[in-house]
Amino acid sequence: QKEVEQDPGPLSVPEGAIVSLNCTYSNSAFQYFMWYRQYSRKGPELLMYTYSSGNKEDGRFTAQVDKSSKYISLFIRDSQPSDSATYLCAMSRVRGGATNKLIFGTGTLLAVQP
Amino acid sequence: NAGVTQTPKFQVLKTGQSMTLQCAQDMNHNSMYWYRQDPGMGLRLIYYSASEGTTDKGEVPNGYNVSRLNKREFSLRLESAAPSQTSVYFCASRGTGASGYTFGSGTRLTVV
């Protein structure tokens, strides 16, 4: 069983839709949770970062963590064609430290249709 | 622009050939990483370097070697390329106390 599970999609939605992307994990020691966005033929870029449980909002993006269920979500409101990308979740036990490596999900491919 | 620079961007090798993938960062980060990304497999860690002069194996190190030349540069070498090493390779770095990685734009390697 993988430590982090993520539905690979693809997920296709019309422009303006609310998008929900999710990951589940098995290691209860994870405390730091991230979402990366990866455009086609580009490297991943950090989109959202949250610590422990709760919500964090940044513009049209909301990251949500439910540690009791070992479940994290990324919501995109008013989705735009420019949001079309692969979204990867990542998590770690502690902050920083080279040996504390990020564990990544496999990524969900999102396509927002104009 | 500050960030992580990878060269080359594309490469085709024949089975058995060798090559070195180069990575350099200008953010004064201590930690550097090499990942490969394959469809359905996600990002898998090959090797990492906690600081200049140290390297450690990741999840899939077989067939690869690395060198942390200085604080800025971390290279990945394929001594005898195999078709199974066809992949997209990403270099990443992380600063002290930071949670996230900064990734390069990747090297697309095909081994025929």
Image (spheres, helix red, strand yellow):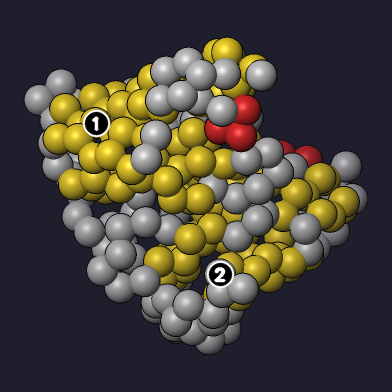
The reply to whether the C-beta atoms of the residues labelled 1 and 2 are less than 8 Å apart is no
Image height of A15 relative to B19, above or below? above
Res A64 visible: yes
- Position of the N terminus of chain A, as image quadrant, is top left
Element marked by disc 1? strand
Label 1, on which residue? A64
Q: Please report, as a chain letter, where disc 1 is located.
A: A
Furthest toward the bottom, the residue is B70
Residue at 29 percent of width and 34 percent of height = A63
Element marked by disc 2? loop
x and y percentages locating residue A58 in the rendered image: 33, 43
Displayed quadrant of residue A27: top left
Image height of A7 relative to B71, above or below? above
Say what amino acid the circle numbered 1 marks: Gln
Res A28 visible: no
Residue at 50 percent of width and 25 percent of height = A79
- Taking the image as shown, residue B28 lies to the left or right of residue A95, namely right
Image height of A4 relative to B10, above or below? above
Say what amino acid the circle numbered 2 marks: Gly
Alpha carbon separation for disc pair 1 and 2:
28 Å
